[in-house]
Image (cartoon, rainbow, N blue to C red):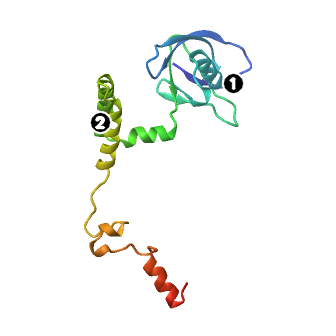
């Protein structure tokens, strides 16, 4: 089991073989490393071996997240043969917000859209499919006004009521005649 080790002067490094599992469709890979090893050095080895960006790489060993400590001495890990390290890429916050802000129903609609898109393309209806999608998005997002709400466009309101502070010709004329402009 991996554990934290204090840095010592004696050199009792041994080479161990660990399994690196990346989150995604990649197969687990084996990596020979010395033990103990700095977390930063392990991250560099895994990033180089799996062609991953080191700045977004996160390591998980035995359920614990290991990171490089800035402005301090890095932590050493004592690894054993057969230990498994999970390498995960940190996703950008905007992508995480997009993923988790959509409901399950919306993800089902997106999935179905991608299922039916090749069918529309095969029948030469691709442009109509995209136009129909655009109009559907527009009309489904129009929403309903609550009682008492007024529209920003006065022609849609009862008695053509305007929003407070709206600048129009009547108000300009009234302000000029009253000497307030």
Residue at 66% x, 12% y is 13
Image coordinates of residue 6 in percent, x first then y, are 66, 25
- First in sequence: mark 2 or mark 1? 1
Asked if residue 94 is positioned above or below residue 8 in the image, the reply reads: below
Secondary structure, mark 1, is: loop
Q: Of 129 and 112, which appears nearest the observer?
A: 129
Look at mark 1 in the image and give the residue it sits on: 7
Residue 159: quarter of image: bottom left
Asked if residue 91 is positioned above or below residue 38 in the image, the reply reads: below
Image coordinates of residue 29 in percent, x first then y, are 51, 12
Q: Of 86 and 54, which appears nearest the observer?
A: 54
| Residue reaching furthest to the right | 9
Secondary structure, mark 2, is: helix
Residue at 67% x, 36% y is 70
Residue 68: quarter of image: top right
Image coordinates of residue 103 in percent, x first then y, are 32, 41
Image coordinates of residue 169 in percent, x first then y, are 45, 77
Distance from the alpha carbon under mark 2 to that under mark 1:
54 Å
Q: How many labels does the image show?
A: 2
Residue 96's disc number: none
Residue at 50% x, 85% y is 175
Residue 109's disc number: 2
Q: Quadrant of the C terminus?
A: bottom right
Q: Is residue 36 left or right of residue 172?
A: right
Residue at 35% x, 70% y is 154
- How many other residues sit within 10 Å of disc 2, few (<14), some (14-19) or many (≥20)? few
- How many other residues sit within 10 Å of disc 1, few (<14), some (14-19) or many (≥20)? few
| Residue reaching furthest to the bottom | 178
Q: Of 47 and 65, which appears nearest the observer?
A: 47
């Amino acid at each position: 089991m991996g554990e934290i080790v204090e840095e010592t002067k004696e050199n009792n490094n041994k080479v161990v073989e660990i399994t690196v599992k990346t989150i995604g469709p990649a197969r687990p890979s084996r990596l020979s490393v010395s033990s103990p090893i700095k977390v930063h050095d392990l991250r560099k080895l895994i990033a180089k071996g799996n062609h991953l960006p080191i700045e977004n790489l996160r390591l998980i060993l035995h359920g614990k997240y290991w990171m490089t400590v800035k402005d301090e001495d890095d932590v050493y890990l004592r690894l054993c043969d057969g230990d498994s390290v999970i390498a995960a890429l940190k996703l950008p916050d905007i992508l995480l917000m997009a993923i988790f802000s959509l409901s399950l129903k919306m993800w089902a609609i997106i999935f179905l859209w991608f299922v039916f898109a090749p069918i529309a393309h095969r029948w030469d209806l691709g442009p109509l499919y995209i136009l129909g999608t655009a109009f559907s998005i527009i009309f489904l997002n129009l929403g309903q006004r609550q009682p008492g709400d007024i529209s920003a466009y006065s022609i849609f309101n009862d008695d053509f009521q305007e929003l407070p502070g709206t600048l129009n010709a009547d108000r300009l004329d009234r302000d000029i005649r009253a000497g307030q402009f």
